[in-house]
Amino acid sequence: MANNDVVIRVQNLKKYFPINKGFLIKKHVADVKAVDDVSFEVKRGETFALVGESGCGKTTTARTMLRLIDPTDGKIEVLGTDISKLSREELLPFRRKMQIVFQNPIGSLNPRMTVGQILTEPMLFHNIVKSKEDANKKAVELLKMVGLKPFHMDRYPHQFSGGQKQRIAIARALSVDPEIIYLDEPTSALDVSVQAQIVNLLLKFQEELGLTYVFISHNLALVRFISNHVAVMYLGKIVEIGDVNEVFDNPVHPYTKALLSASPIPDPAIEKKRKRIILTGNVPSPIARPNGCFFHPRCPFKMEICDKAYPEMKSVSSKHQVACYLVDKREV
Amino acid sequence: MGSILSVKNLSTWFYLEEGVLKAVNDVSFELDENEVLGIVGETGSGKSITVRSIIRLIHHPGKIVNGQIIYRGRGKEEDIVKMSEDQLTEIRGKEISMIFQDPLTSLNPLYTIGDQLMETIMKHQHVDRAAAWKLAVEMLDKVQIPEPEKRMNSYPFEFSGGMKQRVVIAIALSCNPKILVADEPTTALDVTIQAQVLDLMKNLQKELRTGTLFITHDLGVISAMADRVMVMYGGRQMELAPAEDLFHKPMHPYTDMLLKSIPRVDIKQESLEAIPGQPPRMIDVPEVCPFAPRCPRRLDKCSKELPQFAELEPGHFVRCFNPVQVGGDINGK
């Protein structure tokens, strides 16, 4: 990381999905608070990970940050400009700077377009190249960069394996020279032996091109390997955030602890000795979240105060914050 | 402890228009009573087809072309490959039951879970409705579903993913089978729910002493569950060893590389070693080592002939001409 300037600053970001009832007269009855008052910063050249289980709001956070969906409230500063209220036209230059690689490459590549078309369309749209020939030339370059061959230009997505499709999706994201790439579970549809190829490819591009990654995953092992900072989300809120090694080696929030202890380690000797924190019950509905700390009904360390008020974010160290009352109880 | 199931030289092929897809080739292994045998492999490695062959869930154009599957659970040796459909119906669900990956599709949405549990119990244990109801409630209690009496009348959609998988486990274990086949039972679940379900499965397995075939692509899950592990690649067995041996001193280059290519949550790794290339196409494969094109330890003869599946150390079988001697112990650090 050459310089430490902030490229994304998210402040009090909220995304509520309204629930309406009634047939002719629609009445607003409740909100699904998918993202609820989330704030964090992402520095240039780093990988920032959002982790959590399904329904915790990690993908919604990322899509709101990309303005694929509009936020209910809050600020999203990208490269110094608040993009949360920009119009479509005003957003265009930022669209170029922020790209996304989706989880499922089958769904994100148009089956009727050749790889060449998939790669050249964004360049032509954003006027990055002068002519079609230039676009084709650059597309071939991109294919080589991601480990594919020039003759793949004329093929269709269905002719590729899952790992190769994800390489194409990465090449497409790189085609417009972005500064930030959102990676939404980019390897969870892939086999383990191919996952490592894609991860290494992503790390290579980050180093060579100075990219900033926002990485969304439920795979904590992968998050630990790939990212510098991590935010753990639960029911729309960040419960713990900080440097990935600090958070994973010294988790304070019981949810983070449970997530880590639930992630299996590929070593039978360790697994057999390990004491797991097994959480009881399921994640509550995001419509009717519990009072106080949302985690208290499942929390093995529940205290009296926990169902009264939501705990504030407090610092554990300079690089590590947590929203849990336990932080004051730790041995000082 | 004797082996309850012996699979000998099992081959299952699919006759497709493009050619013969040799999904499983010459697979042999034993499953002991009260043992958990893990089968790991990537998509298309043949692990699911292997276990589906064991309960004969192979449909046209697939066919078990060779091999024996000897089941010893009923005091005699019976070859499942030779059984008639009627005999299979007696075995499936009672002697050998199966848990699939997606609990949503293995439960019928139109019946209450009580009906589905009782159907299995009444079919195999020849009891009346009242007795079956009682047994069903007991099973739900055993898989830790709260208020089992009340939940008997619920439909599958009223359950969360983890709870549905518990119901599937309850159905699978309701007739106290000697063998349980679990095909990626936790892949569709969130990690904290996965931990709950794995914990439950482990405890029930110990309690009921069921011989279990546990299939997964997740090496972390397998190390938590399995006593022995079999690694499959390209429709063949590559390595079979006690779990700790396999993880600490893998001998097949594929296993070795696979272990180095997965990230770990407990330590910060400097790099992941990717396995170059793609998994093999399965149609019209020659009789050579399927991993040869991706293997860094490849010898000339690897792409000419197929290595034997040989016992290189007691209980440690490897199919390789050039096995890793000093295994890349991922825990060596």
Image: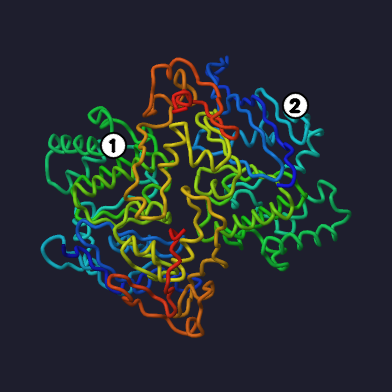
Q: What residue is disc 2 on?
A: A85
Q: How far apart are marks 1 and 2 (CA)?
A: 49 Å
Residue B139 position by quadrant: top left
Rendered location of residue A269, percent (x, y): 34, 55
User: What residue is rendered at 48% in x and 76% in y?
Assistant: B284
Within-10-Å neighbours for mark 1: few <14, some 14–19, many 20+: many
Left or right: residue A159 compared with residue B165: right
- Badge 1 and badge 2 both on one subunit: no
- Does A223 sit above or below residue B55? above
Rendered location of residue A243, percent (x, y): 58, 39
Q: Name the element at disc 2.
A: loop
Q: Which chain carries label 1?
A: B
Q: Mark 2 lies on which chain?
A: A
Residue B181 position by quadrant: bottom left
Q: What residue type is labelled 2?
A: Lys
Residue B61 visible in rendering: no
Q: Which amino acid does label 1 sit on?
A: Ile
Left or right: residue A235 compared with residue B35: right
User: What residue is rendered at 47% in x and 62% in y?
Assistant: B258
Residue B135 position by quadrant: top left
Give A77 or A85, whichever is nearer the viewer: A77
Rendered location of residue B277, percent (x, y): 57, 68
User: What residue is rendered at 42% in x and 77% in y?
Assistant: B320
Q: Name the element at disc 1.
A: helix
Within-10-Å neighbours for mark 2: few <14, some 14–19, many 20+: some
Rendered location of residue A27, percent (x, y): 56, 15
- Does B23 sit above or below residue A280? below
Kindly report which numbered mark, 1 or 2, lies closer to the viewer in this rendering. 2
Q: Residue furthest front?
A: A332
Q: Which mark is drawn over residue B113? A: 1
